[in-house]
Amino acid sequence: MFKNKKIFIILASVIIICVILFWQLGNRSIDINNNPDNAKQNINLVNEGEVSPITGLPCDNYNQRSFAVMLAMDPITRPLSGISMADLVVEMPVITGSITRLMAVYNCQEPSEIGSVRSSRHDYIPLAMGLDAIFAHWGGSHFALDKLNAGIMNNIDAMQNPYNAYWQDWNKHMPHNGFTSYSRLLNSAEKLGYRLTNRFEGYPHLEISKFEIRNSKLSVGRLTIGYPGHYAVYYEYDSNTNSYKRWREGTPEIDKLTGKQVETQNIVVMRAASRMIEPPDYNDVDIEGTGDLVVYRNGEEIRGIWKKEGSYKPTKLYFLDQEGEEIKFVPGKIWIEVMEPYQEVKWGMSDE
């Protein structure tokens, strides 16, 4: 009898262990860190609620990967197509103290034309990686192409033009005549087998009911971004719309598709030094690590630091206040201006 009781206990223990293991396997989420980017996986959704992880606004594509597209800033290319429809834009020098270029990130809206598309620089790659975006570009510096051709991230290069992702407008001068569209990029990414489900955790946002102007004097203000020459930028703040309208070289920044002036609800001024590494064409910007920043939203300034860990890692670019907490954005678009520590930024009130 003792022997039978012992066998019963052993069998019962085995059954219990099997049940526990089965339950754990059935409820275990897939480790997304071990899934290659070019595999289509059924992974748990990163974001809760049907809102963009970037803008915090309702979005049909809320859990789809963004496209980060390199755009020109040259005067000959103005007005740009689709620039007002980007959820987030990074502006950064591609030559120290001179030319700037844009990386426009599209998630919610789907422009029928985006451009003109220009070549990549290596400094933009970590930023696109941090957003879990698919990188779109027309060639690039050898520093950038060395990284991209080694497979550091999913990208769609117009020099190979996979699945007809790009076209050229022969009524415009080269190299300013390259264009793409959201639908073409999506078609190319699907056929290349890239993962389309988003893993970017997103940025925190204020509740819509808390759009408060802390100082009633700031009903109108001008934010001047001290880029040189043809690349000089300023924004006009209007409390009636709680947005900042963008001007370039003294004229409104117009989207060719909409005919309207570009505006944003949030502006981040990041301080990052750069240096020439291959004169006269290529520089290197300290876009990884940490540095000073000022966030402009709701007609106010919030000072803090930015932080991005690792070297060419898909780590998030954080915007932190002076207490080390993430700064919450107004739900809406974000423009990031990367500037040298010595370049002038002025925030002026209408009554000054």
Image (tube, rainbow, N blue to C red):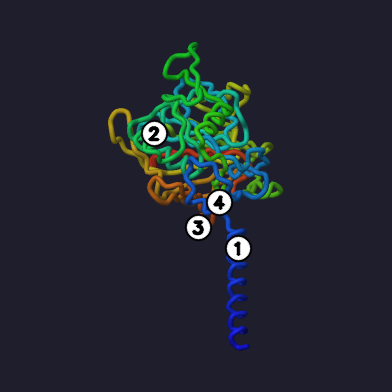
* Image quadrant containing the N terminus: bottom right
Q: What kind of residue is marked 4? A: Ile
Residue at coordinates 44% horizontally, 40% vertically from top-left?
153
Query: Alpha-carbon distance for marks 3 and 4?
Result: 9 Å
Asked if labels 2 and 3 touch by Cβ distance under 8 angstroms, the answer is no
Near mark 1 (Cα within 10 A), the count class, few <14, some 14-19 or many ≥20, is: few
Mark 1 vs mark 4, foreground winner is: 1
- Residue under the image location 54 percent in, 41 percent down: 40
Q: Which residue corresponds to mark 4?
A: 327
The label number, if any, that marks residue 121 in the structure image: 2
Name the amino acid, label 3.
Answer: Gly
What residue sits 30% from the left and 35% below the top?
Answer: 276
Position of the C terminus, as image quadrant, is top right
Precedes in sequence: disc 2 or disc 4: 2
Of labels 3 and 2, earlier in sequence is 2
- Reply above or below: 119 against 218: above
User: Looking at the picture, how far across and down is residue 305, in whole percent?
Assistant: 46, 51
Do callouts 2 and 4 mark residues in contact (Cβ within 8 Å)?
no
Q: CA distance from mark 3 to mark 2?
A: 30 Å
Cα distance in 3D space between marks 2 and 1: 49 Å
Please tell me the numbered disc located at residue 324.
3
